[in-house]
Image: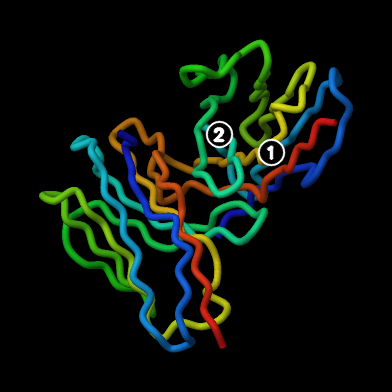
Amino acid sequence: QKEVEQDPGPLSVPEGAIVSLNCTYSNSAFQYFMWYRQYSRKGPELLMYTYSSGNKEDGRFTAQVDKSSKYISLFIRDSQPSDSATYLCAMASNDYKLSFGAGTTVTVRA
Amino acid sequence: GAVVSQHPSRVICKSGTSVKIECRSLDFQATTMFWYRQFPKQSLMLMATSNEGSKATYEQGVEKDKFLINHASLTLSTLTVTSAHPEDSSFYICSAQEGVTNEKLFFGSGTQLSVL
């Protein structure tokens, strides 16, 4: 079993829709949770960073963490074609080494 | 945000040659840098962690004699793929950590290595 499970998609939504992404994990030592956006053949870019259960909002992005269920989510409201990318979840414990999900490819149709 | 420069962005080489990839933190000092490998439609796999002035720590299954890492200064780490073979073809990405939290981890733009 992988430490971090993420459905690779692909996910296709119309412009303006809410994009819902999620990851599950098995390592209860994970304390830090991140979402990255990666465009094709580019390095990942940090979108959201959390370290506690609950919701964190930043503009159109909301990250949710449920440590009891070992489940994290990312929601993108009012999605735009420019949001089309691969979204990676990542997690770390105290050693700061990141474990990544496989990434979900999202296409927002104009 | 902070900038991490990675060069080259793309390299094509013949089997048996060695390839060096550079990773530079342009506007901050990075005590720790990480090297990842990513296959198409797959996740980033951590290869090694390098700290300035000390030997790199390699993940299980990564050949340290094959993938030489040098972190000679607080702003530069290099990955050399020695005697490259077609199975080494992949997308290699570095990241540099500013400070002690994951929030301050910045990624390079990646290097696509193709070994013929």
The image shows residue A83 at horizontal and vertical percentages of 52, 74
Q: What SS does tag 2 mark?
A: strand
Residue at 25% in and 40% down? A30
Q: Quadrant of the C terminus of chain B?
A: top right
The image shows residue A16 at horizontal and vertical percentages of 43, 88
Q: Is residue B96 above or below residue B60?
A: below
Disc marking residue B33: 2
Whether pointer 1 and pointer 2 mark residues with C-beta atoms closer than 8 Å, the reply is yes
Q: Which amino acid does label 2 sit on?
A: Met
Tell me: A8 left or right of B16.
left
The numbered mark 2 sits on a residue in which chain? B
The numbered mark 1 sits on a residue in which chain? B
The image shows residue B29 at horizontal and vertical percentages of 58, 40
Residue at 58% in and 55% down? B2
Quadrant of residue A75 within the rendered picture: bottom left
Badge 1 is on which residue?
B23
Residue at 60% in and 61% down? A39
Residue at 59% in and 46% down? B28
> Which residue is most to the top?
B65
